[in-house]
Image: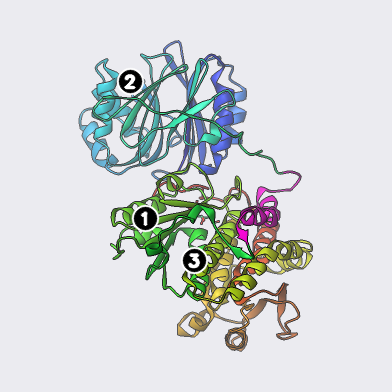
Amino acid sequence: MCGIIGYTGEKTATPILINGLKSLEYRGYDSAGIALLENKKFSVIKSKGELKNLIKKTEKENSVSSVGIGHTRWATHGKPDETNAHPHTSSDEMFTVVHNGIIENASVIKKELEKKGFSFASETDTEVIPQLLSYHYDGNISSTMQKAFSSFDGSFAVAFLCRDFPDTIFAARRQSPLIIGRGENESVVASDTCALSENIQEFTCLEDDEFAIIEKGKIEIFSSGLKPINKKFRKIESVAEKHDKCGFEHFMLKEIFEQPEKIKNLLKGKIRNKKVFIDEIAELSLEIIKAEKIYIVGCGSAYHAALAGKFAIEELCGVPVEVDIASEFRYRNPPVKENTPVIVISQSGETADSVAALRLANSKGAFVIGIVNVPGSTIANESDYVIATKAGREVAVATTKGYITQVMALYLFALHIADIRKTIPDRAIEIYTEELCRIPDKISEILSDTSVVENLAEKYYNKNDIFFIGRNTDFAAASEASLKLKEISYINCSAFPAGELKHGTIALIDKGTPVVALCANERLFKKTLSNIEEVVSRGGEILCVTRKNKIISEKYLSIEIPNCSDLFVPILEIIPMQLFSYFIAKKKGCNIDMPKNLAKSVTVE
Ligand code: M6R
């Protein structure tokens, strides 16, 4: 993870770097730092914690330097303190570096350099980069880069300054994203286009093992063999979405309330003659549509979206779906046959494990369909076809609108394929399609009164452990509900298929143990009810998420959701659960939009 930025031009660099870092804070916020180059000297300012701490420090400085680099960190090696914050500088102060990724052989390189007399100040893997550059440096910067970067295993997006080149930023990349933007008399390097300043008109992406020499408005790119590469630059088309809470107290709440609109957005243009038709996959060959198996991979909430999608695809398309966590898929050599559809789901499109899963699938000849929110991201670029989820920029680390649009995209995919495979009658497709079109209104209905959930937060915010149970589609929602609550409130939460409790976990149920039972799936309602009774008879305290007017028992607390087909239950159940997490975290005084230890885009494995 981590976000990096660099600027060289004619303006004062500090405010540009800080603005860039603000946009990149979603990538990590354990510490932040900048380095400026002025009069052949570096001035490095670092700070522990969120960016606001660094901003305070920089306000006291009045450097007018017009070249610098910046970093916002998600710690991998070494605790999140000021010493380990980037930039890291070589002992001879010739190089200063910001890095996103992991140098896997850092300890070996460090030992070698220590033997040669180098001493290290931090616990990071990154520090070997400036030190190794300094070790190889003989005045020829290109060959120095080539020697240093060919020694590293692992992943890196790096921007660095060299004292001998007062107006220049150098960059290198392997596996971690890095883009370079060009304007009139200024250039920017960054982890993401959202960090480019407004005067940058065009950008290009650095590819694996390429180097760049970046000067004011002039960019040279080389292969690892130092051959110049003529890269295509793309115009920056749209101004980044407004980074504004629009009156909401947190981005997470704002994004929860955006969900009906985002789903409408996604549905737009996809309903024809009462059926679903997705243009982005209009050209899928029959071989792929009629495949005997479909894989879906993703991480975190994207994996939970896949769980929800599996039920819809299996039921509507009559094809087995294997759902996998990307970090497992990538290392288990799955027997994916040629032309088998592999759906890779990712909000950011940059999650390292999901990118690796995609590449593995590609290498096996699979047909990759990306379900991605961020256009131009690695997964969007490397998939054979992309279904864009159109959720817009998601700022809160805990995904809400990102997740829900993934689930909706999978439902739409299921109906599109079912129609071509003719696995269910036309009339059934029409009924399901009509139902999907009503989902935004049903979500709005849930959001129209949040008081029940807010009051419940009062009762739950001081619990240490909360269990979530559900069967089938309810379990998919329970998994996401549990992750949502734990990541922003730090309460220990876990989700189980309701029928699985008795195989061990029920041993943990005691008097007063809170159990949230998702039981809106009508077909399995009675089965889940039996599991609820088993919990209650052991003293567990139940909170049900159930269909409107479904009387379970006066004894249990409950949250109601509007009626819908069992298949689509997760998309509605998750709304009150997002609010439940939000209000609990708020009551606990947690940092809701930037929970501890997390980052929005997980670009390390
Ligand atoms: O960007 P991606 O969808 O690939 O991200 C996957 C997970 O890291 C992400 O869903 C994560 O679990 C969220 N923080 C959950 O709210």
Residue, far front: 273
**Residue type at tag 1:** Ala
> Is 288 left, or right, of 557 in this rendering?
left
Q: Which residue is mark 3?
A: 417
**Residue type at tag 2:** Asp
**Residue type at tag 3:** Ile
- Kindly state the secondary structure of the residue where label 2 is placed: loop
Give how far across and how far down residue 404 sits, in percent: 60, 59
Q: Which residue is mark 2?
A: 92
Mark identifier at residue 357: 1
Q: Which residues are magenta?
A: 246-272
Marks 3 and 2, how far apart in space?
62 Å
> Is 546 left, or right, of 205 in this rendering?
right
Is residue 41 positioned above or below 454 on the image?
above
Characterize the local packing of mark 1: few (<14), some (14-19) or many (20 or more) Cα atoms within 10 angstroms: many
Give how far across and how far down residue 55 sits, in percent: 60, 30
Is residue 526 positioned above or below 143 on the image?
below
Residue 161 image-quadrant placement: top left
Give how far across and how far down residue 57 sits, in percent: 59, 27
